[in-house]
Image (cartoon, helix red, strand yellow):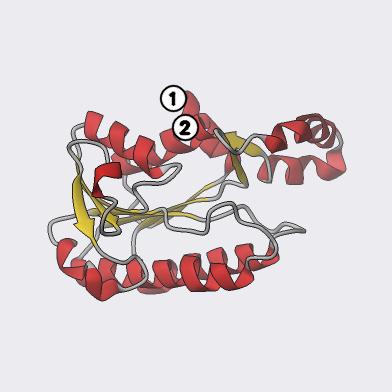
Amino acid sequence: MNVFVAGGTGYIGRPLIELLLKDRHTVRALVRRGSENKLPAGCEPVTGNALEASTYRDHIAGCDTFIHLVGVAHPGPAKKQEFLDIDLKSIEAAVDVSISGGIRHFIYVSVAHPAPVMRDYIAVRTRGEALIRDAGLNATILRPWYVLGPGHRWPYALLPIYALMRAIPLTRESATRLGLVTHREMVAALRYAVGVPSSSIKVVDVPAIRAAGKS
């Protein structure tokens, strides 16, 4: 595949690009000026602004897959405006360039929902999903709840609570849908999505993300 990645220098983007290159995909990644050296060797840097489609529209040509990984770092309940200014604007730009550039498969990291917390974040990511659907793009939408990994380990303390919730019929579905996934599982699920493009809209929930991590 010829893959374009927005958010390629981040927590998930860099290790994903390394695997995609290992799989012999061609990868271009959108970066801010001065961050080109943060990309893995072999990845073609595209200097631009993820919030402005015009800054990278011309570099989509020849790509068939778009992976959107742009978002506010460490999302929290107090970051509503940041979600609107970064998460929403970046997906609006990504969908715009994907339509004009003839992208055949769009990959979007959303979030598990519904949930009793993080409503503003969920609302923005749900709007992102709607933009993709309304555009008529073939897409894989992944819905993790929280990705455990370096710098993201505090939810490990919640694992006993999750185990208890899964044991109770009334809370079992919520515990499964809002379960925790590891960084390795998340990267593996994205890697798998690139290799198996969707011909419609495919939603990958927490159990499916975990399953991809074991494949």
The residue singled out by tag 1 in the image is: 215
User: Which quadrant, please, contains the N terminus?
Assistant: top left
* SS assignment at label 2: helix
User: Which quadrant, please, contains the C terminus?
Assistant: top left
Residue at (52, 59) in percent of width and height: 72
Q: Would you place residue 62 above or below residue 161 in this image?
A: below
* SS assignment at label 1: loop
Quick check: marks 1 and 2 in contact, CB under 8 Å? yes
Quarter of the image for residue 95 reads: bottom left
Residue 169: x percent and y percent?
85, 39
The disc label shown at residue 139, or none: none
Q: Is residue 31 visible?
A: yes
Residue 176: x percent and y percent?
70, 40
Q: Give the left or right position of residue 20, taking residue 146 as reference.
A: left
Q: Nearer the viewer, residue 126 or 121?
A: 121
The three-letter amino acid code for the residue at tag 1 is Ser
Disc 1 crowd rating (10 Å Cα; few below 14, some 14-19, many 20+) is few
Q: Nearer the viewer, residue 24 or 35?
A: 35
Q: Give the left or right position of residue 42, taking residue 84 as reference.
A: left
Q: Is residue 1 visible?
A: no
Label 1 – label 2 distance at C-alpha: 5 Å
Q: Would you place residue 108 above or below residue 24 in this image?
A: below
Q: Nearer the viewer, residue 29 or 145?
A: 29
The three-letter amino acid code for the residue at tag 2 is Ala
Residue at (82, 34) in percent of width and height: 161
The residue singled out by tag 2 in the image is: 212
Q: Give the left or right position of residue 109, taking residue 44 as reference.
A: right
Quarter of the image for residue 82 reads: bottom right
Q: Would you place residue 88 above or below residue 189 in this image?
A: below
Residue at (53, 38) in percent of width and height: 208
Disc 2 crowd rating (10 Å Cα; few below 14, some 14-19, many 20+) is many
